[in-house]
Amino acid sequence: MDNGLILQIREAHALITKLLTASYAHCIEISEKYKNTVMAGRTHVIHALPITFGFKTAMWAQEIRRSLDRLEEIKPRLFVGQLSGAVGTLASQEGKGLEMQRLMMADLGLNQPVISWHPSRDHIAEYVSVLAIIAGTLGRIAREILSLQRTEICEVEEPFLWEK
């Protein structure tokens, strides 16, 4: 069960990383394209000093970049397998437990644990925390885009494409 969970998380992690990398690249592209497009800077939705739209999207890009870094940094702690017996001591393996564990983790492509982690879920909680940061970032960006599209502001708009 534990190894299956980590393998599922690893698959999801790869997909999330791929999508977030594409979002980062898109923000960088927009930042370059609109680096000289002046707009109102805002603090708590109140006009402040002028900024450029490229500056705004560059801030988005850097927030996404930090999350990509977090996703990379967590991998050694997160992608750790589990084979340790009922209570975690490998006692049932008659002295061959560590070697069995090493072979199994090599086969699964997971890191070998320093010690049994079956009752410990802090690495999974850490991963969920990173996902929450990512969700917060993407939600904030989406809210900003929605706000900037409002009729009375109309500083950005999404393309409208006809499908044929």
Image (cartoon, rainbow, N blue to C red):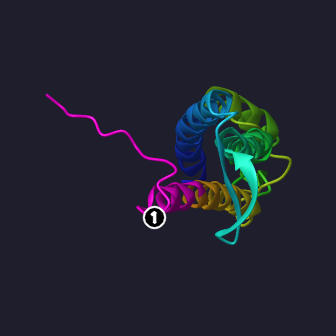
Residue 130 placement: quadrant: bottom right
Whole-percent x and y of residue 131?
63, 56
Residue 121 spot, x, y in % from top left: 71, 63
Q: Secondary structure at mark 1?
A: loop
Question: In this figure, which residue is indicated by the disc labeled 1?
Answer: 152
Q: Which residues are magenta?
A: 141-164
Question: Viewer-proximal residue, 4 or 139?
Answer: 139
Q: Residue at x 53, y 43 (%)?
A: 12
Quarter that holds the C terminus: top left
119 relative to 112, above or below: below
x and y percent of residue 57 in the render? Answer: 66, 43
Work out whether residue 90 or residue 142 is closer to the camera in this orientation and state it. Answer: 142
Tell me where residue 140 sits by quadrant. bottom right
Residue at point 70% right, 33% down?
35
Q: Residues within 10 Å of mark 1 (few under 14, many from 20)?
A: few
Query: Does residue 143 show up magenta in the picture?
Result: yes
- Position of the N terminus by quadrant: bottom right
Question: Does the magenta run of residues contain 14?
Answer: no
In the image, is 164 to the left or to the right of 130? Answer: left
Question: Is there any visible trace of residue 113 in the rendered image?
Answer: yes
Query: Which residue is nearer to you in this view: 17 or 110?
Result: 17
Helix, strand or loop: magenta stretch: loop
The spot of residue 162 in percent (x, y) is 20, 34
Q: Residue furthest left?
A: 164
Residue 87 visible from this viewpoint: no
Q: Residue at x 59, y 42 (%)?
A: 13
Q: At label 1, which amino acid type do we have? A: Glu
130 or 148: which is nearer to us? Answer: 148
Residue at 73 percent of width and 42 percent of height: 55
